[in-house]
Image (cartoon, grey):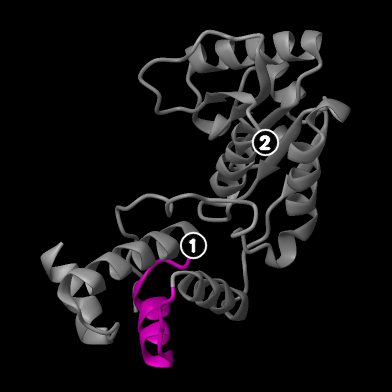
Amino acid sequence: MQQIALDIGIGANPTLTNYFAGPNGEALSHMQRLVQRPNTDSVPTYVWGAAGSGKTHLLRASAAAMQSQGASVGWLDASQAEVPEFDESWSLLVMDDVHIYDAQRQHIAFGWFVQAASLQRPVLCAGSSTPVDLLLREDLRTRLGWGHVFGLQPLTEAQTRAALRQAADARGLFLGDEVMDFTLRRFSRDLGTLFALLEELDRYALQTQRAITIPLLKSMLENT
């Protein structure tokens, strides 16, 4: 059966705590050290992997952790209508989806790298492939591969089930095995999609005052 990729974004409030690492524990540990001691490692960090592997979750969670400590964070991605000017007060620079940067974004990203290096500020980036395979200008591609590089591995089905169960428990929701089976058969298994689906399901269950069942899930898809 073909799985459905829902047009809904990553679940709300990604944190390093609610990131289900699975085989990616080394990358998670690195992010935790980075936000705890950002001034001790100004070497760039690049994470890569397929869509849904958790790249954006790690980047957003790291940025949020820094901001919760009162730090200022610079953010660059391919969808921003307006790119902020480089700010020397930034304690961390984050660049997401670098693999789809246009020429203007690549120019800006390279400039951010240069200025971050001069100020010894850490840079955290993510893309879809290894640095050597990125179709970007050479000076930017080289900088992306210069420091810490982590390839994110997909979760096994058992790990995906565990991650979804953990997210449901955190919301105080009960997902029966039949609902879990139906969800994993019918929807894309990347955690961004699954967590966003869970968020919508939680909201819909509260609105309708019904338990989470397959009929409720089908009703939500028909009415939202």
Asked if the magenta segment contains residue 173, the reply would be yes
The residue lying at 58 percent from left, 55 percent from top is 53
Magenta region, residue range? 172-189
Residue on which the image places disc 1: 190
Crowd class of label 1 (few under 14; some 14 to 19; many from 20; radius 10 Å): some
Residue 185's quadrant in the figure? bottom left
Circle nearer the N terminus (1, 2): 2
Mark 1 vs mark 2: give the one in front: 1
Q: Position of residue 25 (x, y in %)?
A: 76, 59
Q: CA distance from mark 1 to mark 2?
A: 23 Å
Q: Position of residue 2 (x, y in %)?
A: 34, 73
Q: Position of residue 145 (x, y in %)?
A: 77, 31
Mark 1 residue type: Asp
Q: Which mark is residue 133?
A: 2
The residue lying at 18 percent from left, 69 percent from top is 207
Mark 2 residue type: Asp
